[in-house]
Image: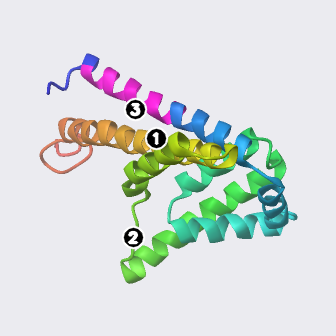
Amino acid sequence: MADGLPTIAAQAAGALGLFLLGMGLMSEGLRQAAGPALRQLLCAATRTRAQALGSGILVTALVQSSSAVTVATIGFVNAGLLALGPALWALFGANVGTTMTGWIVATIGLKFKIEALAMPLIGLGALLRLSGQDQRASAFGTALAGFGLLFLGIALLQQTFGRRWKRWRSWTRPSTGSWSACADRP
């Protein structure tokens, strides 16, 4: 496939569309499926700034993806399940958790790619949505499919721009290994 600007723009638009569609489905599904238990759990985990920060660190360290935590947090705020203030502290915790995840990966070599769950989440979410016997299962399926589409969109955006970035870097970097073509001139 040609790597011209129209192709890159089309791939980026499609990936961004999947990301935004996933965000919308996830938010709508969470809004419909959220019972009082989820709201209470989120309120308890983010009651103080320290608890919200700790929750962000813990969840990010567990799922090894600050992107997933950020998306879920935005979805919770968008669905009205979490206030903006505690959400910001949870996002700060997600950034700290990302650093801790880097240390864990560097130390023991354990890395889990959350994008690998995209297709199974979409499939399971669609199954729950289409065969949901009750409103809550159907809404939970919508949220799962939204998460999956969102992760698929992120992976496609990374794939689209990752190859282009490496190619661009190879074009702009001189073959001498220095960053500036003028650096080797006398």
Name the amino acid type tagged 2: Lys
Give the x, y percent position of residue 25.
58, 36
Q: Nearer the viewer, residue 29 or 5?
A: 29
> What is the spatial separation of the Cα atoms under label 3 and label 2, in whole angstroms?
24 Å
Q: Residue at x 26, y 45 (%)?
A: 179
Q: Total marks drawn?
A: 3
Mark nearer the viewer, 2 or 1: 1
| Residue identified by numbered label 1 | 149
Res 99 visible: no
Does 39 sit above or below residue 150?
below
Is 4 displayed left or right of 21 in the figure? left
In the rendered structure, which disc, 2 or 1, sits on the residue that comes first in sequence? 2
Name the amino acid type tagged 3: Ala
| Residue identified by numbered label 2 | 111
Picture quarter containing residue 18?
Answer: top left
Q: How is the image coloured?
A: rainbow
Residue at the top extreme?
6
Q: Residue at x 53, y 52 (%)?
A: 67
Number of residues whose C-alpha sits closer than 10 Å to that of mark 2, classed few (under 14), some (14–19) or many (20 or more): some
Q: Residue at x 35, y 39 (%)?
A: 156
Mark nearer the viewer, 3 or 1: 1
> What is the spatial separation of the Cα atoms under label 3 and label 1, in whole angstroms?
9 Å
| Residue identified by numbered label 3 | 15
Name the amino acid type tagged 1: Leu
